[in-house]
Image: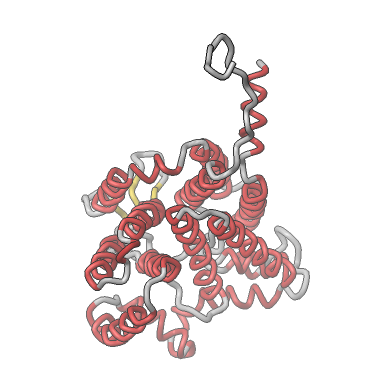
Amino acid sequence: MKKIISQIKSFIKETDKILLFLCTLISALGIVLVSSATNSGDSLFSRDAKVMLLAVVVGITGALIISVIDYNFIVRLWPIIAGVCILLMFLLFIPGVGVGPPERPDAKTWIVLGSTGLYFQPSELVKIGFIITFAVHIDTVRDNLNSLKNIILLCMHAATPCLLVLISGDMGSALIFIFIFIIMLFSAGIQLKYFAIGGLLVAAALPVAWKYVLTSIQKDRILAIINPEEYPDIIYQQQQGLNAIKSGGLFGKGLFNGTYTKIVPENENDMIFSVIGEELGLVGCVLTLLLFIAIVIKIIRIGKKSSDNMLILLCTGVASMIASQVIINIGMCLQLLPVIGITLPFLSAGGSSNLCIYIAIGLILSLYRHTQEKEIVNFRVKNISTPFD
């Protein structure tokens, strides 16, 4: 019994309680906000809120389980992780398995989970798989990182998940992969000249992408930001979301008292920030942003405290994933960026996003746990004869 109690104490001591608390706090806020956004008056918790609650509970449990696994063991599984991620993406293209949102029937972004009525978005899990495999790739070539050969191979590595999610119709996730790719390379110490060359190549490719890659709806969403009067139907969602945020004033109208948010399309998903703005006001928006900043900084600090290159890369990858999604999602809600289907981590409804974000947090908790200094055990060996007796 004493051994079990000791193990529990050790488990609690070696868990990053601050990070876990911050994540749990913002998830609790998310469940309440989704309940408010989808409340029809029949019950306090809508189906979306219940699915989110279940995903968060399972996610936190999974994160704690992952945290006791040595991250070195997880990293050594990179070939399996890469294979599973590629398999999940290919499943999307099987007829009857992959489906898209109602407004994008041509897209294949979710896997139907039988007759449960639930869906799983593979790209959410593939982001984590990419962070792990890309960290392994960078760490493997770190002694000759800036050679042209390694730069090309790293670009090809990143291009694989980007192209797969792009073909499936998920441009938002493709953009997140690009952000993770850039920030992890910058953190690893890639020479700036390569970023400059990359920027020039992207600029040169933009006209081609506009003509041959972007769909008509994606083009309209970009043009609607520039000239909203010409695209009233396209910009409607963002305008209503922005009106909701403005109507909240300093302290908001109070939870479950929003009026604008009830007519904002996807108010529980992509536009959840509009619910914060209307019901919790400017103060609520600022506090929410501070929570995100605290989580990202906490993850980065875990990496900075270590001399292990792999650990630093993994922390950078997860932090950049969360930060880029926050920036893009809030930019959409403020009508600064086009709508591209990016959820707000911890806050938006959806089982896939909430479950997978906690898998990433579990990885960070593992990094934290296995870099803590262990207590020195005082013991004495008996019945051993030595020349020094």
Q: Position of residue 92 (x, y in %)?
A: 27, 53
Query: Which color scheme did the rendering employ for the protein?
Result: secondary structure
Of residues 39 and 201, the one nearer the viewer is: 201
* Left or right: residue 333 compared with residue 2: left
Which quadrant is the N terminus positioned in? top right
Is 345 placed above or below 352 here? below
* Left or right: residue 82 compared with residue 32: left
Q: Position of residue 54 (x, y in %)?
A: 54, 41
Of residues 73 and 95, the one nearer the viewer is: 73
Q: Quadrant of residue 146?
A: bottom left
* Left or right: residue 104 compared with residue 238: left
Q: Position of residue 143 (x, y in %)?
A: 33, 62
Is 159 placed above or below 312 here? below
Q: Is residue 103 visible?
A: no
Of residues 155 and 46, the one nearer the viewer is: 155
Q: How many marks?
A: 0
Q: Quadrant of residue 221?
A: bottom left
Q: Is residue 358 visible?
A: yes
| Residue sitting at x 45%, y 50% | 352
Which quadrant is the C terminus positioned in? top right
Q: Position of residue 80 (x, y in %)?
A: 29, 43
| Residue sitting at x 51%, y 43% | 366
Of residues 309 and 260, the one nearer the viewer is: 309
* Left or right: residue 10 compared with residue 107: right
Q: Residue furthest front?
A: 387
| Residue sitting at x 51%, y 61% | 319
Is 242 placed above or below 109 here? below
Q: Residue furthest right?
A: 251
